[in-house]
Image: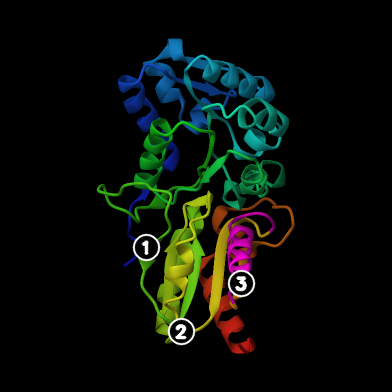
């Protein structure tokens, strides 16, 4: 049961701590940052291993190309900056220098989605997942809490291929315990048999809270966590088939164009399933300045707005 008293933890801190831990075990790990290491928490690695840390300054394209060069020599580069700059400014370099060559570069971007808050539209990446999942050879991961973030970073080191891992700015409560093991599969985090809600990242906790609200209204919602947007787990089709009502909702802190909702839409279309899919996210528009809580609510991805949307769609949709 999610409560308001649950401790909030930083996924960025989880990233920094895990880098230090893994860096002690694997001398091939190197870290590059674009002058925001205090925000991304790669400063922890820089303090511990200064000779394996490279501050590229505000030259993100150079940083990506340098990482590709390091990977070509057997290093395991972790590259970090804000999601807006990690994907938007560097798309050409990621496409041609990393993905085309299948280089083992891990792009771990922080400050994804509207929960960046007051920095506004220029810093709120709402297209980054769409950009990255469109690239051949790229794996796209969106962890939902501290423990999953740690395990996702460990998974990245153990598996040799390009990866994009998106971390939010805001702190989040634990959903998974210390025994959690990261895999590429989707998983049910709350059981239900009326409708299914699929989410990840910082909207997973909002979806869980929404499920609790819906339960009070007599609606049993199955909450499915899909941490890997690419490759999408086809096992999701089996999970959603357990629900009586053929309605499916996706919730994401991202544009509804090209993100998790689009990936699920493509999956059910390819399989020819007769499901009603409702994509909940930022509706093809830019972000704006405000607190994270205000913006989650404004864009319809807070727990209360998710629950209201589910109720409305269930009342107005005839299947």
Q: Main secondary structure of the magenta part?
A: helix
Q: CA distance from mark 1 to mark 2?
A: 31 Å
Name the quadrant containing residue 261: bottom right
- For the magenta stretch, what is the residue range? 257-273
What residue would you read off at disc 2? Answer: 244
Nearer to me, 210 or 289: 210
Q: Alpha-carbon distance for marks 3 and 2?
A: 18 Å
- Helix, strand or loop for disc 1: loop
| Rendered residue at 52%/44% (across/down) | 169
Q: Is residue 85 left or right of residue 212?
A: right
Q: Which residue is mark 3?
A: 272
- Residue in the foreground of this view, choosing between 11 and 130: 130
Q: Distance of mark 1 from mark 3, alpha carbons?
A: 41 Å
First in residue order: circle 1 vs circle 2: 1
Secondary element type, mark 2: loop
Badge 3 marks a residue whose secondary structure is: loop
- Residue 197 sits above or below residue 74 on the image: below
Say which quadrant the N terminus sits in. bottom left
Label 2, residues with CA under 10 Å away: few <14, some 14-19, many ≥20: few
From the viewer's side, name the closer residue of 104 and 147.
104
Confirm whether residue 124 shows in the render: no
Q: Position of residue 125 (x, y in %)?
A: 65, 45
- Asked whether residue 260 is drawn in magenta, I would say yes
Which tag is nearer the camera, tag 1 or tag 2?
2
Q: Earlier in the sequence, mark 1 or mark 3?
A: 1
Q: Which mark is residue 118?
A: none
Quarter the C terminus occupies: bottom right
Residue 203 position in % (x across, y down) = 50, 59
Mark 3 surroundings: few (<14), some (14-19) or many (≥20) residues within 10 A: few
In the picture, the disc for residue 4 is 1
The quarter of the picture where residue 25 lies is top left
């Amino acid at each position: 049961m999610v409560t308001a008293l649950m401790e909030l933890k930083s996924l960025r801190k989880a990233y920094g701590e895990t880098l230090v831990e893994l860096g002690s075990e694997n001398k091939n790990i190197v870290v590059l940052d674009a002058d925001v290491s205090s925000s991304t928490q790669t400063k922890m690695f820089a303090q511990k291993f200064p000779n394996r840390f490279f501050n590229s300054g505000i030259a993100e394209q150079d940083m990506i190309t340098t990482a590709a060069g390091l990977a070509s020599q057997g290093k395991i580069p972790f590259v970090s900056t804000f999601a807006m700059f990690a994907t938007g400014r560097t798309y050409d370099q990621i496409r041609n220098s990393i993905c085309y060559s299948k280089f083992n570069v891990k792009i771990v971007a922080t400050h994804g989605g509207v929960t960046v808050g007051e920095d506004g539209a220029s810093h709120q990446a709402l297209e980054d997942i769409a950009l990255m999942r469109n690239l051949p050879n790229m794996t796209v991961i969106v962890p939902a809490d501290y423990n999953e973030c740690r395990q996702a970073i460990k998974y990245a080191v153990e598996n040799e291929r390009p990866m994009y891992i998106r971390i939010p700015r805001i702190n989040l409560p634990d959903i998974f315990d210390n025994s959690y093991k990261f895999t590429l599969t989707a998983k049910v985090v709350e059981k239900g048999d009326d409708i299914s809600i699929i989410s990840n990242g910082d909207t997973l906790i909002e979806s869980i809270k929404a499920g609790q609200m819906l339960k009070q209204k007599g609606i049993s919602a199955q909450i499915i966590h899909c941490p890997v947007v690419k490759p999408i787990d086809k096992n999701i089709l089996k999970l959603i088939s357990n629900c009586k009502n053929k309605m499916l909702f996706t919730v994401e802190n991202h544009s509804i164009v090209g993100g998790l909702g689009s990936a699920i839409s493509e999956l059910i279309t390819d399989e020819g399933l007769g499901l009603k899919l409702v994509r909940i996210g930022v509706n093809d528009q830019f972000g704006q300045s405000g607190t994270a809580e205000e913006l989650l609510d404004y864009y319809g991805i807070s727990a209360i707005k998710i629950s209201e949307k589910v109720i409305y769609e269930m009342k107005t949709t005839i299947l």
